[in-house]
Image (spheres, coloured by chain):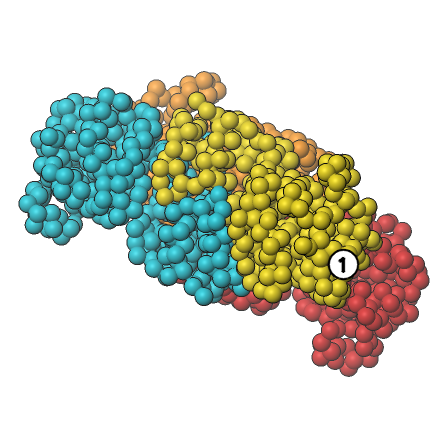
Chain colours: A red, B orange, C cyan, D yellow
Amino acid sequence: VEKIGFLGLGIMGRGMAMTLAKAGYPLTVWNRTPEKAKEFAALGVEVADSPEQAAEGNDVVIMMLADPTAVREVAYGPNGVLEGLRDGAVLIDCSTVDPATSQNLASAAGQKGARFLDSPVAGSRKAAEDGQLILMVGGDENTLGKVRAVLETLSKTIIHAGGTGMGTYLKLCFNLIVGHMSAALAEALVAGAKAGLDPAVILEAVNSSVLANKFYEWKGNCILDRDFTTNFSVRLMHKDLNLMMSAAYGLNIPLPVTASVKELFGIAKSCCDPEADFCSVVRALETVTGVEVKRV
Amino acid sequence: VEKIGFLGLGIMGRGMAMTLAKAGYPLTVWNRTPEKAKEFAALGVEVADSPEQAAEGNDVVIMMLADPTAVREVAYGPNGVLEGLRDGAVLIDCSTVDPATSQNLASAAGQKGARFLDSPVAGSRKAAEDGQLILMVGGDENTLGKVRAVLETLSKTIIHAGGTGMGTYLKLCFNLIVGHMSAALAEALVAGAKAGLDPAVILEAVNSSVLANKFYEWKGNCILDRDFTTNFSVRLMHKDLNLMMSAAYGLNIPLPVTASVKELFGIAKSCCDPEADFCSVVRALETVTGVEVKRV
Amino acid sequence: VEKIGFLGLGIMGRGMAMTLAKAGYPLTVWNRTPEKAKEFAALGVEVADSPEQAAEGNDVVIMMLADPTAVREVAYGPNGVLEGLRDGAVLIDCSTVDPATSQNLASAAGQKGARFLDSPVAGSRKAAEDGQLILMVGGDENTLGKVRAVLETLSKTIIHAGGTGMGTYLKLCFNLIVGHMSAALAEALVAGAKAGLDPAVILEAVNSSVLANKFYEWKGNCILDRDFTTNFSVRLMHKDLNLMMSAAYGLNIPLPVTASVKELFGIAKSCCDPEADFCSVVRALETVTGVEVKRV
Amino acid sequence: VEKIGFLGLGIMGRGMAMTLAKAGYPLTVWNRTPEKAKEFAALGVEVADSPEQAAEGNDVVIMMLADPTAVREVAYGPNGVLEGLRDGAVLIDCSTVDPATSQNLASAAGQKGARFLDSPVAGSRKAAEDGQLILMVGGDENTLGKVRAVLETLSKTIIHAGGTGMGTYLKLCFNLIVGHMSAALAEALVAGAKAGLDPAVILEAVNSSVLANKFYEWKGNCILDRDFTTNFSVRLMHKDLNLMMSAAYGLNIPLPVTASVKELFGIAKSCCDPEADFCSVVRALETVTGVEVKRV
């Protein structure tokens, strides 16, 4: 059975690492702020002092970090993952980064005799805890085959998006859609509420139709209940939309609507709580209009 | 059983009128271009020479027209519906118009001793033919009760949105969401295709997740198959987004993302086929980028 | 010398009517709220009780009203201008309206044997007082020739934009540019201030360059001095941008940037003072970011 | 008199280097593609084989390159500027880059005992040739004082924007405004032309008003004459708007209108000639609408 190093114990990373621990994998964890590692230590999981140490001697090394800057620090920094990565290991980056960062990690891992997969995830905090994530994997089929059992522990669905970086591109496209759908919900609910509609009726119409989806049912009700407990923050959604816009710049593809969606999240990040759940983007419109969307 | 007058035999109106005819309602139809009424005549349905005549003597008069201008002409014009509407009748406008038009129709109907419901519909051409639409009804409960059997013949779901005009507001909010979701799909598919992703993989990711919905499955595959057979045209979606923006102006609600979505549909209407299905909004981005999204 | 009826004594109309009075034209004024007419009465100007009376017997009738709704009420309403308009008179609408409203006024005036010019204005409150406006005139050359002396009293520049409605289109294009330039200033100043630039340095750079213009010098300094005294309100700029977007819908021209500019004014109208000068659009960004642009 | 090394002989760099040569400064030039250096060699100017050699032994080293990537390669690459920079020299980056790149250059120069100014420029190709640029300088006053004579040779105006990076921020704010004003002109001209206005009348209205500026006179006439000879390309304006959006992300400032402007340039870059002058952004709208703006 593979020995695993896991770096990053945030909302998602914590659930993923816990899933791996419960599945019985020999596990070493690392987190920038050590407090978050304590509950793992209490379970007998090894806690590393540095990214290097978390990587050392392990067959599979998984990173689940906030953004490209964090990934670069943890990977390339002093006592970083790349210093610990052993020949033949597989480095898996589950963070959402830009495609260039994925490409560079693949090269750097290759120079250490290791392999690389970009494998950003979709799914909630609970899906992370339950091993029910969706993984969007970029890299070669052999490498994916080698770690499939580990990835299956974390996920209900593994999508092989293509070569290195394609998992990252797929995730950015995916979050583009999540961002648009959130903005749509926000604008429909605020305009509808101002018009005098019961916002629940808007959700009812959506959920009676071909548009019906669990995301709108879930986040729509969070908004109506004013429950902005964070699964994925406004700040991180804004970061991912920013990564998508940068990627699109590189691809020479104009994305006029995504550009607007990103700025709406930017407004929410500026004027409201950046750490609240991203469905609180509705508060950007509420703040500027004075309308509050709530259950009637 | 209610005698029904039905005005407007476009893509949706034709299916709705046919559903009523098949359900055995005594029916009179009218269409601006008489050719479309011929198949009804062939079935023994009465064909009126004017909106007035289509309304005359009927218990329920239903309009299903393209836009507010068409509705106003048919309702208020010479030999218009209002001249034929009998005391006690119920006028139902299933067209998607602006809330003020709905309000005005309610007043005008009231002056004739008639009642009014705004009842725009959601659903495909096939849903119209199968009596499986969603109706979003504005007006008082009594009036709705009086015609519920007729409306149930047309629909699988009836949502009572509130008083006069609320059906219209709800429909505009609904189509706002449809518009955003279409734009999201278009931007994700074009950017993803340019990045080298198989567009089917993007659909797969969406449909594996909480975002999964029939709309994306349906329209996503239409795009990949380059099947832009019209259920609802780019032109009409642009019209509805324009109505939403006008309504929002009246409500004093800024809708920055919807504004961008509307312009994207405006580009598609200008540069591509305005009568193609609205999922062909993807062609706006394809035209300016030279990327074509298709099945690999 | 022409006898003139003047309707609408708002910020601009007041200055214009005063200019005509001082130039010695026999003048009748009307305003919806009679208080504003008092200073004219004090000068011996006749004050009409109704739009009809303001039009009656006059050679030239000028309207300077807030929006299309106001124009339609004053023109077509009971005791409206059209009831008073005499055969051979010239009706001039200096309000900024939509092109259809201009077209309809021309027809209605024609039916009374009168002629029509749409002649929206550009210029500040002071330019109105000083007879230094810019007039953008739609209508035939003969009619323009007939009233040129009156219009020259009001203006430093008369631009004959074309036939009926072309003055209105020109004004909408003009205000589109004003709106964009205001949004540009707002976004540059807020971003620059957050970056640590002295905002005065941004104005200095602009005014050293080919971009240099009096508008930026004027409004830029108003912003730095936090002087939002109204020349033209956020509400009216938002109205004009809304008219432009509606006109563009009719013209089948997508205007993706103007759509965003309009929503930014919509945010300012919602979250800040709608009656403040339109350069206070900067407050929309200040409100959501917490940055204040001010002289260092 | 200072010995100067100059790197980058594109549209702007060529004119600037030529101005310095004509002013009699001992000059060494370098360009990535050596052909562009030939005319300098013909004038007796020294041509370096590498950035390092262009920097070596010079008192002032000026870079005028296309984008941050080019700057980083030329500065930090093998045989790069930093290897040649002597103790006590002043490195001036006239390229438009991101603020972080400016900061990093300042640190790197400092480590070599050299000083640094970011000094992006505003002005046309002709202004570069005539030594009439506007320089926006970031860095300390002493360093600026030391090279003021050199900078004055290049410019008509030197604006000291603040410390390191502030020149870059100022330039990004400046080009934000240029981008908006270009988009405004494009949208007004295309909408106006479709409405039937002579586009020259739109320019006339602008230039009669407080908006009047040389930029609109110049670029407006270029558009009407269909003269898209490049002073500054669509591609580079899109790059600068992208830098501004990235900087704004870092500053936590939403820029909803600039985001739209950037995408309009992105459309122009994709669908039309990316190397044409940036005023050809009008072609993005022309392409999607089929309207051509031209002199009547």
Q: Is A50 above or below relative to B10? A: below
Give left or right: position of C149 versus C68. left
Residue C204 appears in the rendering: yes
Residue farthest along the bottom direction in this orientation: A42
Residue A203: where, in percent of width, then height? Answer: 50, 53
> Which quarter of the picture shows residue C76?
top left
Q: Nearer the viewer, residue D159 or B24?
A: D159
Q: Name the residue under label 1.
A: D85
Check the picture and name the quadrant holding the N terminus of chain D: bottom right
Chain hosting mark 1: D
The residue at 30%/51% (across/down) is: C231
The residue at 88%/54% (across/down) is: A143
Residue B121 appears in the rendering: no
* Secondary element type, mark 1: loop
Give left or right: position of A138 versus D232. right
Residue D272: where, in percent of width, then height? Answer: 62, 32
The residue at 36%/47% (across/down) is: C237
Give left or right: position of C137 versus D100. left
Q: Nearer the viewer, residue A199 or A114?
A: A114
- Mark count: 1
Residue D192: where, in percent of width, then height? Answer: 42, 31
> Which quarter of the picture shows residue B118?
top left
Q: Is D194 above or below relative to D95? A: above
Residue A231: where, in percent of width, then height? Answer: 62, 65
Check the picture and name the quadrant holding the C terminus of chain D: top left
> Which quarter of the picture shows residue D91?
bottom right
Q: What residue type is labelled 1?
A: Leu
Q: Nearer the viewer, residue D83 or D236?
A: D83
Residue farthest along the left direction in this orientation: C44
Q: How crowded is mark 1: few (under 14 residues within 10 Å), some or many (20 or more)?
A: many
The residue at 13%/42% (across/down) is: C22
